[in-house]
Image: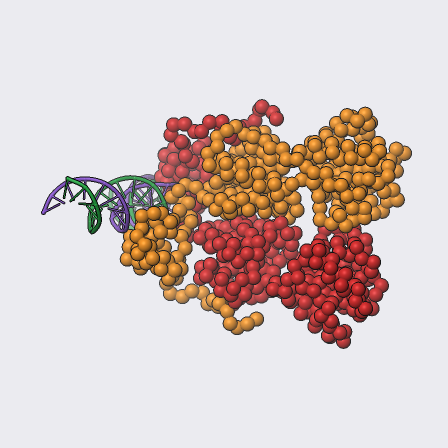
Chain colours: A red, B orange, C purple, D green
DNA sequence: ATCTGGGATGACAACGTTGTCATAAGAACA
DNA sequence: TGTTCTTATGACAACGTTGTCATCCCAGAT
């Protein structure tokens, strides 16, 4: 590494009196003005002569002054920041959503706190408490399944919250959801159009809101088309490689084995794809959630895509609308899904 | 939606005097004690009798009191929060890294601000300024390529920073990097072990630190093995579907076409995989960065995997070490990569 | 009974900012 | 010249918390 460059870590602890960060007081003294005038300049308030403004800006630059937002926040009783609580930051759907939220946040001059609950109600509660203690202006939450009211105690009464991906049990609030039923119906329709009659559903744990919505819609869609609903062809469990493979084997060894499979989320799709590797039969497949490389697999995987970015954007915008004083009743927005046809849904029945 | 449940958004704006959030003063009054004693209880300081403690806890619960962290932060001159500036939150490598950082942060009782620079130096500078104005304890930055010193002006002198994935141009500070050269050498070795002699490198833009490190290592590795370095077989440009396909066609139509390709990052791998779809020849492939579904493609894709989670963890831990007063000189940590052999590297030359 | 020590408690002054209000200095008017 | 209005400016008190230090009270020692 070059030996030239600005060193960030001094090799020695600071000695003598530690010069703490300059404050408005320091700037004021240096510019020979009052504190309030500095404040005015920093906040671009009008009513400061060009001359003094120049002096102050100069002093600010000299000292490297940066306003202390903690102090401003305290004075104003609110912070220009948002909190986001999700289940797993690294999951593609969620990281896309976060990105969109962040985009909207900076457009409104806000910063974004993120916290992940890992699906744990305790951790979620702690995160929400920590965030509201930090006086975030608003919260965007993907609620973990938990006792009704668990979140409610953590949320201050006056806080602005938008739930995303799923509603909070026992709480009525703004909510951005995917049109899960619509997505499933489109998938079933696509499969029946291709003459599939025996369709299986492999979903995640049934205590997840999206999963029950999806499996319910699945049952409903079959009935609507006069197809039998066979519980041996519906599996709802946390997808892990081993059990998924077993489930798949069981289903495909049935006399009336399914000729097509719909999955409940991306994890299930992955599990099924892995499980399928060891099978002779090649059922058609439609996965819930799009994923990278879906188009390069053979066959390319048809999916029900959610618009994660748009969900995040909508959530953030709704939140800012609340923050700027919209006191209409809570609203729930359903965001359309899109069936991306790639081939795996058209395998011969 | 059920009509039972706790309503979060009143349909009407608050009327009359808006009851603002209760403070320690309110709790103190209700419990009939002094403010400081409340503070002691809230912070679990010793020296409060069990009796008064019980009263205070009761009052806290009654009022729904939550300490105002802005005030505490102001008083203490620091906040228990970290800032993370990355390029793109939604990119898998980065979201994994963020997740690991967040994990370490909450273990230390800190919250995490995230901001994305989108690779733009202006936006990066703004983010860093906003974060340091918010008095974050420390920063973790994936520096955008920018003028030397650009970041330096945004950073307060005394701040603790760890750079991750790449160093900041012109700044000397703690740094967590992948062993890019090691990864490339392993890949080249793997290919030559399988008798490949003509290997191409398809990387991203050459002004990215990681890309120059990787392509340099590639050249070096070829030379080391007495293989010719042919510039027609090295491409360094932002990977987009069209140009990638063209590049690939050009290379594969050479008389001495490459029998194997190494890519510079995940985006390049994707571009190459897409481009390969339209080609007759099937060169061997080793991608830099692992990705979902790599094992399900045909052939499964051999990759040089970085441990994003570990990088985030190390970065955060190093940061906390600094925060707790380690004043040793800056250090750079190189994290080993791992060659995950899956098959695409072993195609016949 | 007095003294001493320690544990429990609260008064008070910060922290760095912003909102309110008062004041000073000109400018415009009669 | 005196009056009024405007504009620029600063003094001062919050905001809600924590650190410092003084006080109080009671147990135990004298």
Of residues B334 and A232, which is closer to you in this image?
Answer: A232
Q: Quarter-wise, where is residue A283 in the image?
A: bottom right
x, y percent for residue B72: 40, 46
Is A289 drawn above or below residue D11 in the view shown? below
Numbered disc total: 0
Report the quarter where the N terminus of chain A lies. top right
Is B182 drawn above or below residue B120 in the view shown? above
Task: Give me the residue at 40% from left, 52% from top.
Answer: B67
x, y percent for residue A250: 76, 63
In the displayed structure, does residue B145 sit left or right of residue B135? right
Of residues B270 and A272, which is closer to you in this image?
Answer: A272
In the image, farthest residue toward the top: A3
In the displayed structure, does residue A181 sit left or right of residue B255? left
Task: Give me the residue at 75% from left, 35% from top.
Answer: B187
x, y percent for residue D4: 31, 51
Task: Give me the residue at 62% from left, 46% from top.
Answer: B96
Of residues B95 and A135, which is closer to you in this image?
Answer: B95
- Camera sees residue B334: yes
Task: Give me the residue at 90% from left, 34% from top.
Answer: B255
Q: Quarter-wise, where is residue B142 in the image?
A: top right
Is A213 drawn above or below residue A64 in the view shown? below
């Amino acid at each position: 590494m070059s030996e030239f460059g600005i060193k960030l870590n001094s090799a020695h602890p600071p000695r003598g009196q530690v010069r703490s960060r300059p404050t408005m007081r320091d700037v004021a003294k240096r510019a020979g003005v009052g504190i309030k005038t500095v404040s005015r300049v920093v906040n671009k308030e009008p009513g400061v002569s060009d001359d003094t403004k120049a002096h102050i800006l100069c002093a600010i630059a000299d000292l490297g002054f940066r306003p202390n937002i903690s102090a401003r926040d305290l004075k104003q009783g609110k912070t220009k920041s948002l909190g986001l609580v999700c289940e797993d930051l690294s999951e593609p759907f969620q990281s896309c959503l976060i990105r969109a939220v962040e985009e909207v946040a900076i457009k409104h001059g806000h910063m974004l706190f993120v916290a992940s609950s890992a699906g744990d109600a305790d951790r979620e509660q702690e995160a929400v408490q920590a965030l509201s203690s930090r006086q975030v202006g608003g919260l965007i939450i993907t609620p973990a399944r938990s006792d009704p009211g668990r979140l409610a105690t953590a949320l201050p009464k006056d806080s602005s919250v938008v739930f995303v991906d799923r509603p909070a049990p026992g709480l009525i609030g703004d909510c951005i959801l995917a049109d899960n039923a619509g997505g499933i119906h489109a998938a079933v329709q696509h499969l029946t159009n291709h003459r599939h009659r025996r369709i299986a559903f492999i979903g995640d744990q049934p205590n997840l809101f999206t999963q029950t919505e999806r499996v319910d819609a699945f049952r409903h869609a079959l009935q609507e088309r006069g197809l039998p609903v066979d519980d041996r062809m519906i599996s709802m469990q946390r997808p892990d490689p081993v059990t998924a493979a077993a489930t798949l084997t069981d289903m495909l060894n049935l006399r009336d084995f399914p000729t097509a499979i719909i999955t409940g989320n991306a994890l299930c799709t992955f599990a099924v794809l892995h499980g399928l590797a060891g099978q002779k039969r090649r059922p058609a497949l439609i996965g819930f959630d799009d994923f990278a490389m879906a188009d390069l697999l053979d066959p390319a995987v048809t999916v029900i895509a959610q618009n994660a970015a748009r969900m995040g954007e909508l959530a953030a915008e709704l939140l800012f609308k609340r923050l700027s004083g919209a006191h209409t009743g809570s609203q729930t927005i359903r965001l359309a899904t899109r069936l991306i046809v790639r081939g795996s849904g058209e395998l011969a029945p």
